[in-house]
Image (spheres, rainbow, N blue to C red):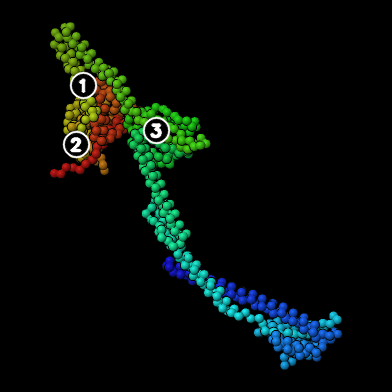
């Protein structure tokens, strides 16, 4: 189809050129005819004036003396000379035959066949006394047809030469165009020929090759720098957000997404006020846009179920005219440093506070027994039971501290196995049946999936025991605790829901801190150490799992612990 269109265009072009050549030849031919006619007219005018002076004497035409001379002159010059009187009757001709009477509508100069005719009046004393007619052969240019053929063939030859030039330049130019398009697409494999016959094409090819090499080197250098910069930005250890001059987010690095537990998929090119959920950060960025100065602030932000501490630095990117072209916001996570500071500051106070009550009770009851209460057997037994209870509280506290310390050590390892969450949950429920019955709390096991997961069965059991213990402790008498196992595409989850006292929304990120209690008095009365949820959090993280907490004061709390799902064992 493409070749047919090309042939059609070629035929149209050739037809047009041939028509133009024929028109040019026609115009040239007409110009030559006009020029020859004009030359003939001038020559006949000159001869007519000369002959008129010879035949007019004393106001009349006299041919007797000059007649033989005119005849000889006419034969020599191949000119027929005819003289007419005033009435138009022929009186002389250099030819043997007399011409007919002169026609009234005879033109002064005319062309007829191969002859040119000139008719001029003969005047004397301001009167026309006769007419002189000269006839001579028309001027003919020898070889004019050959000249026309030369023009025609030259035009055809030029067209052929033009097509030859177009064809010889078309392929190199098309190759150069394809080569340029490939360079725009980042492909530099095409190499132009350096053996072209045409100097201009050779120079073009050499220039394209040099351009390809230069662009390839520039692109390679740019790619290396971009990859290095991207690697640096992605692995710098701090969260980064790049915002353009219009307040739209241009880039968010992986560290920020990991620190804030978000994929930020909808953040690209969005207004920063619409997607960043922290008012203090938005105010800080807006302040930098206005002041055009760097701002540094230490903030505490809720992230999922945690509260994290960040050193936030916002720096403007200014152009030569001091106009803000963008802002770089750097988020340095100092949560671990803050936690270490808090642990160092609060550990002694918390442990002392937790140990104070049981130790005080033990000392008080021991002194009372030594002072004589031991003689009362009933009172002695009551005091000893209280002392045993307080001693067990001390034992639980020390055990939990040792467990937490062991879990937090760098060399702590998980005994990875394929486990059934349902079987572990059933085993844990057996431990609390008696305790739940004592508070008239219904433990409802909701039917569900088997919940095959990767994990340490002992540690998963420890997680479930702590959560079930807390649910029973914070659920009033006659309440309900529901437990279930569910499977999703990549996770298996253990869910426990109670209808107890619930937790305030702002307290949820803190319930996994050491010794933190929502209701401190009630926690001590229930025998809790304040370390259970901290142990749960660390064990779930060691299993590379996830914790979700949903709670509403007065209605209860739901914990969802997700583990990595796996296939059931064979057999």
Label 3: which secondary element: strand
Q: Secondary structure at mark 1?
A: helix
Q: Nearer the viewer, residue 468 or 144?
A: 144
Q: State the residue in front, 344 or 544.
A: 344
Mark 3 vs mark 2, CA separation in Å: 38 Å
Looking at the picture, does residue 510 appear above or below residue 191?
above
Specify whether residue 498 is in view.
yes
- Distance from disc 3 to disc 1, alpha carbons, whole Å, reads 41 Å
159 lies left or right of 530: right
How crowded is the residue under tag 1: few (<14 C-alpha within 10 Å), some, or many (20+)?
some
- Could you tell me which secondary element the residue under label 2 belongs to? loop
Question: Would you place residue 160 above or below residue 340 in this image?
Answer: below
Q: Which mark is residue 330?
A: 3
Disc 2: which residue: 416
3 or 2: tag closer to the N-terminus: 3
Q: What label does residue 398 carry, if any?
A: 1
Q: Is residue 125 above or below residue 461?
A: below
């Amino acid at each position: 189809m493409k070749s047919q269109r090309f042939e059609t265009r070629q035929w149209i072009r050739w037809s047009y050129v041939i028509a133009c050549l024929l028109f040019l030849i026609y115009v040239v031919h007409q110009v030559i005819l006009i020029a020859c006619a004009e030359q003939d007219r001038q020559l006949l005018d000159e001869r007519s004036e000369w002959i008129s002076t010879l035949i007019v004497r004393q106001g009349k035409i006299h041919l007797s003396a000059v007649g033989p001379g005119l005849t000889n002159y006419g034969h020599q010059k191949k000119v027929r000379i005819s003289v007419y009187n005033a009435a138009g009757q022929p009186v002389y001709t250099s030819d043997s035959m007399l011409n007919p009477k002169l026609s009234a509508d005879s033109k002064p100069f005319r062309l007829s066949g191969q002859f040119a005719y000139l008719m001029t009046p003969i005047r004397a004393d301001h009167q026309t006394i006769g007419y002189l007619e000269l006839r001579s052969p028309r001027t003919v240019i020898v070889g004019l047809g050959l000249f026309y053929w030369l023009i025609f063939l030259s035009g055809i030859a030029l067209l052929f030469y033009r097509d030859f030039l177009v064809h010889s330049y078309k392929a190199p130019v098309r190759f150069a165009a394809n080569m340029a398009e490939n360079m725009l697409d980042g492909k530099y494999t095409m190499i132009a020929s350096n053996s072209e016959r045409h100097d201009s094409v050779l120079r073009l090819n050499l220039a394209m090759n040099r351009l390809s090499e230069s662009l390839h080197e520039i692109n390679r250098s740019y790619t290396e720098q971009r990859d290095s910069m991207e690697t640096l930005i992605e692995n710098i250890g701090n969260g980064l957000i790049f915002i353009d001059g219009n307040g739209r987010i241009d880039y968010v690095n992986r560290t920020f997404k990991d620190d804030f537990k978000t994929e930020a998929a909808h953040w690209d090119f969005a207004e920063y006020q619409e997607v960043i959920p922290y008012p203090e950060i938005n105010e800080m960025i807006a302040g930098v846009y206005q002041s055009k100065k760097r701002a540094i602030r230490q903030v505490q932000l809720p992230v999922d179920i945690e509260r994290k501490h960040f050193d936030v630095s916002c720096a403007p990117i200014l152009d030569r005219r001091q106009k803000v072209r963008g802002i770089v916001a750097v988020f340095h996570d100092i949560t671990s440093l803050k936690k270490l500071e808090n642990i160092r500051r609060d550990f002694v106070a918390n442990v002392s506070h937790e140990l104070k009550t049981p130790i005080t009770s033990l000392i008080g009851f021991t002194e009372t027994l030594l002072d004589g209460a031991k003689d009362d057997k009933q009172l002695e037994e009551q005091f000893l039971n209280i002392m045993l209870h307080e001693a067990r509280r001390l034992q639980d506290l020390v055990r939990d501290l040792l467990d937490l310390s062991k879990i937090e050590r760098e060399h702590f390892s998980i005994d990875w196995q394929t486990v059934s969450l349902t079987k572990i949950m059933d085993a844990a429920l057996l431990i609390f049946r008696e305790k739940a019955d004592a508070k008239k709390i219904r433990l409802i096991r909701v039917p569900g999936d088997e919940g095959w997961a990767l994990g340490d069965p002992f540690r998963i059991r420890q997680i479930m025991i702590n959560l079930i213990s807390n649910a029973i402790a914070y659920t009033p008498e006659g309440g309900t605790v529901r437990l279930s196992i569910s499977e999703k595409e990549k996770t298996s989850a253990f869910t426990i829901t109670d209808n107890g006292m619930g937790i305030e929304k702002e307290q949820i990120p803190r319930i996994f801190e050491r010794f933190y209690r929502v209701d401190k008095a009630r926690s001590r009365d229930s025998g809790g150490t304040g370390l259970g949820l901290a142990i749960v959090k660390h064990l779930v993280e060691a299993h590379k799992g996830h914790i979700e907490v949903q709670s509403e004061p007065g209605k209860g709390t739901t914990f969802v612990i997700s583990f990595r799902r796996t296939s059931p064992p064979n057999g």
